[in-house]
Amino acid sequence: MNYHFSVCATANYQEKYIEFLLQNYELLKLGYSFPVSLSYLSSPIFMEREAILVLDDEQNVIGAVGYIHGTGEQHYEDIHIVQIQVLFLLEKYRRSRLFLQVLQFLAQHLAQLKEPPLELRFWATDRTGLEKISARFAMKMSATHTDYGINTQYQADFKSFYAFAMAYPHERYY
């Protein structure tokens, strides 16, 4: 089966992005309350349309990636920092090859922006099992205990992330 990616540049795809994440909210295992989670999930749409859908051959949404430029602490003026708000694949598609393809698409997409990022930031709860792969290209910056588990912040130099993602055989997605 082939998969493809679509940047959510239209209202239809933006709606699909939000619908998909809300339908799978419990499976996301986010480390926040629902209102906070909803703000993180929807912010890529409201702040520049920085959302990507992963689709199968029948155009079914099987995954989503959302990110924003900048940080709240700097009023989103530090656009050299990209914060990944969500990266999610349905469980039956969580094969390492598709996950790698998602990372490769994201790396290529970000590298081709008018102003590519210098740094990536993302968060993962202890329930996601992403510690090993994250450690291969990112550094743990902090861990916070919440009512929803331990939420760990990671930070990566964009060049390190790009090199990690592209070190494996890949297709050009553009």
Image: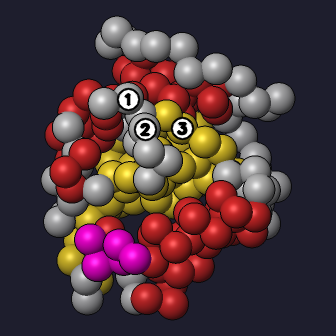
Q: Distance of mark 2 from mark 1, alpha carbons?
A: 6 Å
Q: Distance of mark 1 from mark 3, alpha carbons?
A: 10 Å
Precedes in sequence: disc 2 or disc 1: 1
**Along the line of sight, the residue nearer the viewer: 145 or 95:** 95
Report the coloring of the rendering. secondary structure
Q: Give the residue displayed 53% in from the left and 81% down from the top.
A: 38
Residue 13 vs 159, above or below: the answer is: below
Residue 25 lies left or right of residue 37; in this view the side is: left
Question: Dot 2 corresponds to which residue?
Answer: 57
Between circles 1 and 3, the one closer to the viewer is 1
Q: How packed is label 2: few (under 14 Cα within 10 Å), some, or many (20 or more)?
A: few
Q: Are marks 2 and 1 in contact (CB under 8 Å)?
A: yes
- SS assignment for the magenta stretch, majority: helix
Question: Dot 1 corresponds to which residue?
Answer: 2
Mark 3: amino acid? Phe
Residue 113 lies left or right of residue 57; in this view the side is: right
Where residue 63 appears, x then y in whole percent?
Answer: 41, 52
Question: Dot 3 corresponds to which residue?
Answer: 5
Q: Are marks 2 and 3 in contact (CB under 8 Å)?
A: no
Residue 108 vs 123, above or below: the answer is: above
Q: Distance of mark 2 from mark 3, alpha carbons?
A: 11 Å
Mark 2: amino acid? Asp
Between circles 2 and 3, the one closer to the viewer is 2
Magenta region, residue range: 23-27
Q: Give the residue displayed 45% in from the left and 77% down from the top.
A: 22
Q: Are marks 1 and 3 in contact (CB under 8 Å)?
A: no
- Res. 2 image quadrant: top left
Is residue 1 covered in magenta? no
Mark 1: amino acid? Asn
**Residue 85 seen:** yes
**Along the line of sight, the residue nearer the viewer: 138 or 104:** 104
